[in-house]
Image (tube, rainbow, N blue to C red):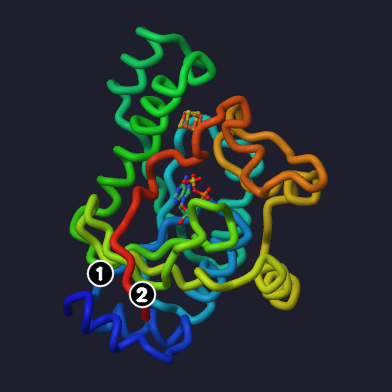
Amino acid sequence: MNFEEVQTALTGKSIQESLSLLTSVLPGQVSFSTSLSHEDQVLTDLIFKNALPVNIFTIDTGRLFNEIYELIQVTEARYQQSIKVYFPETGEVEALVKEHGINCFYQSTELRKKCCNIRKVVPLKRALKDVKVWVTGLRSGQSENRHTLQLLEWDHVHQVIKYNPLANWSIEEVLKYVDEYTVPVNPMYKQGFASIGCAPCTRAIFPGEDIRAGRWWWEESKKECGLHEPVTNFQI
Ligand code: ADX
Ligand code: SF4
């Protein structure tokens, strides 16, 4: 199934119907990446509850908040299913730390991106090997960079169709879903965190601040880690 065929097939379908169709046409080749955010927990709930054969994986950078590890366990227990965890290559992390120090990401944007590349982007590549459709919890309302986000995109970096089922959801819709279905969530959101990544690179935000203001807050540059590079956008 090529991009256009997927696009046509999914038009007018619900998330559940779309995932069901994709996994029946591309068995074993549809994978969802979760960072355990509210958005990701909505998709995890939909996938696990409906027993959709989507592979769910997360990337443990080695620097995550303990709340995320707790939530992985709580989620697996709740749905009686497992989330595959990918780790960075040991040698690459050791070399980075040896050469630049354990918290080198604060020194420069270049080193910060190097750390993100080793700890997130490289494991993502491994997770997406042999995958045809990459499902994410991205929303267009999450940041200015994401305003043009589409439901379906072609990711030329990973050569996969990227499916962002929540692209057009508002944060209110996400919170309503989480409430309605008592989906397990990270308690840090109640403590002022709005977007949660690695512990040393995430802080809570002040009232009125942008959702992603707490990510790499010491940097001026656009707040992305390289997981989501610019893609080719198509309307659906
Ligand atoms: S990031 O690029 O800034 O880190 P963000 O935290 O907004 O991304 O999450 C957006 C989407 O990227 C998530 O819905 C998820 O699909 C994916 N993602 C982010 N971090 C991870 C992670 N550690 N493991 C797996 N997927 C992730
Ligand atoms: Fe490294 Fe920070 Fe990127 Fe995590 S978010 S991979 S700790 S630079």
Q: Identify residue type, mark 1.
A: Gly
- Near-viewer residue (58 or 139): 139
Q: Earlier in the sequence, mark 1 or mark 2?
A: 1
In the image, residue 14 above or below residue 76:
below
List the residue tagged with mark 1: 28
- Near-viewer residue (121 or 71): 121
Residue 96 figure quarter: top left
- Near-viewer residue (183 or 215): 215
Mark 1 touches mark 2? (CB < 8 Å): yes
Q: Which type of secondary structure does the marked residue at label 2 adopt?
A: loop
In the image, residue 105 above or below residue 131:
above
Q: Residue at x 53, y 77 (%)?
A: 49
Rendering coords of residue 190 (x, y %): 80, 50
Q: Is residue 26 left or right of residue 224?
A: left
At label 1, counting other C-alpha atoms closer than 10 Å, the crowd grade (few under 14, some 14-19, many 20 or more) is some
Check residue 109 in the rendering and tell me which mark sits there, or answer none. none
Rendering coords of residue 77 (x, y %): 59, 61
Rendering coords of residue 193 (x, y %): 72, 44
Q: Is residue 144 left or right of residue 16?
A: right
List the residue tagged with mark 2: 53
Q: Identify residue type, mark 2.
A: Pro
